Image (cartoon, rainbow, N blue to C red):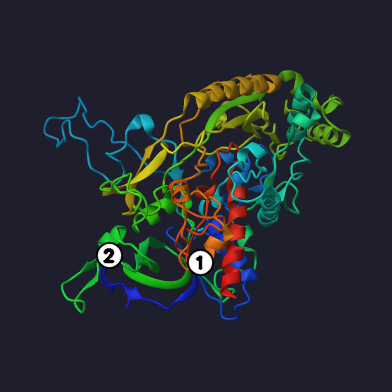
């Protein structure tokens, strides 16, 4: 029957217990914890993902790729090494979210060629509604099984108390779930202790700022039997071996290349005259109201549309994709709505958006640290000095006595009230920081400092009734500004980064201190933020959520969407706070609590 169902006549498929949209670490947290905790013997969990499955193991990190390249720094041609762990500058694949139209006038174009003149082109690749001055031009998404966990940095710090002031969970409960999240993500502190460069950078900075002020960066990573390599945690880590091979557990199914369009609701708009002839208008799901009945999904490869009934629905499609799906299902502010109408459902959807600023630079380590490094008893222990001496003996023509396979540094100066930013002092290339042939990569250190943005209702993302993105979904448009206080802290952060960089080395030409494009952190929070609701109200048939809670949040402490007992959200978007640290661990923590709640309800 593939390909026979049209947009207006979708195929109704068998009901499942839990439907999950999104295969990133949050969607996988929901799946893992529900599968592990539910006592229901015939449990069925269905996960869909818009992107393709690029690895037999669900959601494996791309830096664990089996693609091989010859390592040019060694004389041994048999040394075939894992691609991204040896060529980190080849890494990163993202698609921008909102791109304003570019100027189309070309003065040297031949007069016979067609040209739009002064009119902007209408294209799925740009957004004519986006004002550049309030855009997040660096914001991008990935569409693949495993989501952002296929290429994240794996940094998993515990948020400072100032980064969780608005959490709907009490401190003890929050930290309990944060610790559980660390276990689920396989977070470790010591996996780079064998690195010469790591210990060198760490010791130089400890000498400058004190031992307690400089720490190992908490990372979701585990060193392999071959100590030269590591396994980076991905969505497969979260799922666990039992479920990460699709089909290995009959209770769990992943459908890649399936796109959620929205939800069919009890009062979705109809087409037709009499009740017998009427049918749902699937082009206007955004006008629907009432309880959630079905997920409306497109099988992209088969070109067919599906209706999927479930007891519980989870949307974990990222900080932009999640509110996009809800907006396309009738929630949030629509352009034709009265913004002050208290009857609007989930008025906070897409609002209270926060994103982190990034200051960035790269340095080349100072000569005094590198020359005769094997003799620096003040900076390196005997084991690390011995490794450097061994490299010198094996490769006497190499002026740098650091082993070719030496792992990169992974150091942080943690957030404090006096220095309210998160730091990563390491080597990692995303879409910036490409060293190329300019310098030996063993001497390069990246400094990335991440700043907070004050929570503000007027920072938001909206979705278009008129324009669509390249996937046919409502086009997101940003309206985000940094307030004066944010800018002042950013300036202090930049100054501090330059000071720290100066302790280590000289700036690499082309990678001088700079602020990166807004949105490049990919750490957007708040677009479906949580807020605590009285427990007795949550269990009522009609939840009766206070209007002030509805105005400030989308879901309760269980990540359950207000007034919808079968609809849940997950991702960085649920975090209600302004954060400087990487948010994934916090998002996983909230998802664990939500999944436990669903599992209990299913039993």
Image coordinates for residue 596, horizontal then vertical, percent: 61, 64
Give the vertical position of 558 relative to 515 (above or below). Answer: below
| The disc label shown at residue 439, or none | none
Q: Residue at x 62, y 53 (%)?
A: 589
Is residue 430 visible in the rendered structure shown here? yes
* Quadrant hosting residue 542: bottom left
Q: Residue at x 26, y 65 (%)?
A: 269
Image coordinates for residue 544, horizontal then vertical, percent: 46, 59
Give the vertical position of 519 relative to 284 (above or below). Answer: above
Image coordinates for residue 101, horizontal then vertical, percent: 28, 36
Name the residue furthest left. Answer: 112
- Mark positioned earlier in the residue sequence (2 or 1): 2
Image coordinates for residue 6, horizontal then vertical, percent: 26, 70
Give the vertical position of 427 relative to 592 (above or below). Answer: above
- In front: 75, or 475? 475
Horizontal side, residue 335 vs residue 554: left or right: left
* Quadrant hosting residue 271: bottom left
**Which residue matches tag 2?**
282
**Which residue matches tag 1?**
540
The C terminus sits in image quarter: bottom right
Q: Residues within 10 Å of mark 2 (few under 14, many from 20)?
A: many
Is residue 234 visible in the rendered structure shown here? no
Horizontal side, residue 231 vs residue 9: left or right: right
The secondary element bearing badge 1 is classed as loop
- In front: 317, or 373? 317
Q: Are marks 2 and 1 in contact (CB under 8 Å)?
A: no
* Quadrant hosting residue 448: top right
């Amino acid at each position: 029957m593939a390909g026979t169902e049209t947009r207006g006549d979708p195929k109704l498929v068998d009901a499942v217990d839990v439907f999950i949209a999104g295969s990133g670490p949050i969607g996988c947290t929901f799946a893992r914890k529900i599968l592990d905790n539910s006592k229901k013997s015939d449990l069925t969990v269905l996960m869909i993902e818009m992107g393709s499955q690029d690895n037999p193991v669900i959601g494996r990190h791309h830096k664990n790729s089996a693609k091989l390249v010859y390592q040019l720094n060694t004389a041994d041609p048999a040394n075939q090494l894992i691609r991204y762990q040896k060529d980190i500058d080849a890494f990163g694949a993202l698609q921008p979210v909102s791109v304003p139209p570019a100027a189309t006038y070309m003065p040297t174009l031949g007069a016979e060629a067609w040209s739009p003149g002064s009119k902007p082109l209408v294209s799925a690749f740009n957004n004519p509604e986006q004002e550049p001055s309030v855009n997040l031009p660096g914001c991008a998404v990935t569409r693949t099984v495993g989501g952002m966990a296929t290429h994240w940095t794996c940094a998993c710090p515990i948020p400072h108390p100032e980064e969780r002031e608005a959490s709907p969970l009490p401190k003890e409960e929050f930290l309990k779930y944060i610790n559980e999240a660390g276990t689920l993500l396989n977070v470790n502190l010591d996996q780079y202790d064998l690195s010469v460069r790591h210990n060198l950078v760490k010791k130089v900075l400890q000498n400058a700022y004190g031992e307690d002020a400089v720490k190992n960066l908490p990372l979701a990573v585990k060193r392999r039997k071959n100590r030269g390599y590591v396994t980076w945690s991905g969505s497969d880590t979260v799922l666990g071996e039992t479920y990460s091979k699709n089909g290995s557990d009959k209770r769990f199914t992943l459908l890649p290349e399936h796109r959620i369009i929205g939800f069919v609701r009890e009062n979705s708009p109809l087409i037709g005259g009499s009740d017998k002839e009427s049918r749902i208008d699937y082009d206007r799901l955004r006008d629907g109201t009432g309880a959630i009945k079905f997920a409306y999904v497109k099988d992209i490869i088969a070109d067919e549309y599906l209706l999927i009934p479930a007891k519980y629905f989870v949307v974990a499609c990222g900080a932009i994709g999640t509110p996009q799906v809800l907006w396309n299902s009738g929630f949030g502010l629509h352009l034709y709505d009265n913004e002050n109408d208290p009857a609007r459902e989930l008025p906070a959807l897409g609002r209270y958006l926060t994103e982190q600023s990034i200051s960035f630079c790269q340095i080349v380590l100072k000569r005094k640290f590198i020359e005769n490094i094997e003799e620096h008893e003040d900076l390196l222990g005997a084991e690390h000095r011995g490794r450097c001496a061994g490299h010198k003996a094996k490769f006497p023509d190499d002026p740098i006595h650091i082993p070719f396979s030496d792992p990169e540094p992974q150091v942080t100066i943690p957030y404090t009230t006096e220095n309210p930013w998160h730091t990563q002092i390491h080597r990692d290339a995303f879409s910036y920081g490409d060293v190329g042939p300019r310098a030996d990569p063993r001497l390069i250190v990246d400094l990335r400092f991440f700043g907070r943005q004050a929570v503000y209702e007027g920072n938001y993302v909206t979705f278009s009734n008129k324009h669509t993105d390249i996937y046919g979904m409502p086009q997101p448009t940003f309206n985000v500004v940094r307030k004066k206080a944010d800018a002042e802290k950013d300036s202090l952060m930049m100054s501090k980064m330059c000071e720290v960089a100066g302790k280590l080395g000289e700036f690499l030409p082309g990678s001088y201190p700079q602020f990166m494009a807004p949105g490049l952190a990919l750490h957007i929070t708040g677009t479906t933020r949580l807020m605590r609701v009285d427990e007795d109200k949550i269990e009522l048939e009609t939840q009766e959520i206070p209007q002030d809670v509805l105005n400030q949040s989308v879901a309760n402490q269980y990540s359950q969407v207000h007034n919808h007992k079968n609809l849940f959200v997950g991702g960085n978007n649920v975090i209600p706070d302004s954060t400087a640290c990487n948010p994934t661990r916090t998002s996983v923590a909230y998802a664990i609590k939500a999944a436990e709640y669903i599992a209990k309800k299913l039993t």
